[in-house]
Image (cartoon, helix red, strand yellow):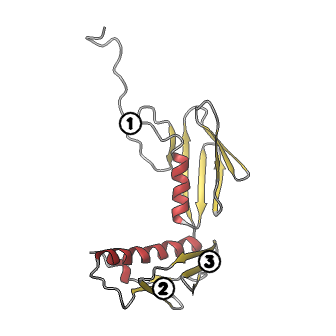
Amino acid sequence: MSRIGKQPVKIPAGVKASKDGAELRLEGPKGKTAHKTNPNFVYEITADAITVKPAEAVSLADRRIKALYGMERSLIDSRVKGVLEGYTKTLLLKGVGYRAQLQGKTLNFTLGFSHPINYRVPDGITVTVDNQTKVIVSGIDKHMVGQVAADIRMFKPPEPYQGKGVMYENEQVRRKAGKSAAGAKGAK
């Protein structure tokens, strides 16, 4: 069993943490964010760490609470990292004529369909297009960055025969062999 929930979340220099009612507010060089606290846990903020502990009325014998304990600590840790460094996902467009353009808060894709695809970038996310075939999604919220990157990838997921499509930068696409030659033995 993992005991990640017991470890305190370190607050690095440049990040401020405060508790305001049912929210844990974090502020850093990349921006501000708020985390909705869980009533089953108590949050202790010191000068250099945030500690998550189960509330007195809650027992860690409950499997659901035990699972939430580690997750709650990890969510706070990812928010601290987000306001300090931010998160980035890079997507590559592979295919003849595949390209992207950024016009204001709208991404325009040409992905081999009969029509262009327009994607409105949500608030809190920054998108840059490099060389028309590289899309860089960045922001302070890990979930939002991942969701926007996944939404863009779903427009044209990489296909296994020619390797074309929208893929993550370090994604390995498993390739499949195509049909065998028409002049093969036994073909009619």
Quadrant where the image shows the N terminus: bottom left
In this view, the residue in front, 116 or 13, is 116
Q: Give the secondary structure at mark 2.
A: strand
| Element type at mark 3 | strand
Q: CA distance from mark 2 to mark 3?
A: 15 Å
Q: Residues within 10 Å of mark 3 (few under 14, many from 20)?
A: many
Q: Quadrant of the C terminus?
A: top left
Q: Amino acid at mark 1?
A: Arg
Q: In the orientation shown, which residue stands out farthest toward the top? A: 188
Instruction: Judge from the rendering whether residue 101 lies leftward or rightward of residue 74; answer left or right.
Output: right
Q: CA distance from mark 1 to mark 2?
A: 46 Å
Look at mark 1 in the image and give the residue it sits on.
175
Residue that appears at 37% across and 78% down: 69
Residue 50: mark in rendering? 2
Q: Secondary structure at mark 1?
A: loop
**In the depicted structure, whether residue 144 falls above or below residue 108:** below
Q: CB of mark 3 within 8 Å of CB of mark 1?
A: no
Q: Which mark is residue 28?
A: 3
Residue kind at label 2, given as amino acid type: Ile
Crowding near the residue tagged with mark 1, few <14, some 14–19, many ≥20 C-alpha atoms within 10 Å: few
- Out of 67 and 90, give the one closest to the viewer: 67
Residue at the outermost right position: 104
Q: Give the total of numbered labels.
A: 3
> Of circles 1 and 2, which is in front?
2
- Residue at image position (55%, 81%) is 23
Residue 176 locus on image (x, y percent): 36, 33
Give residue 19's position: percent from left, percent from top: 56, 86
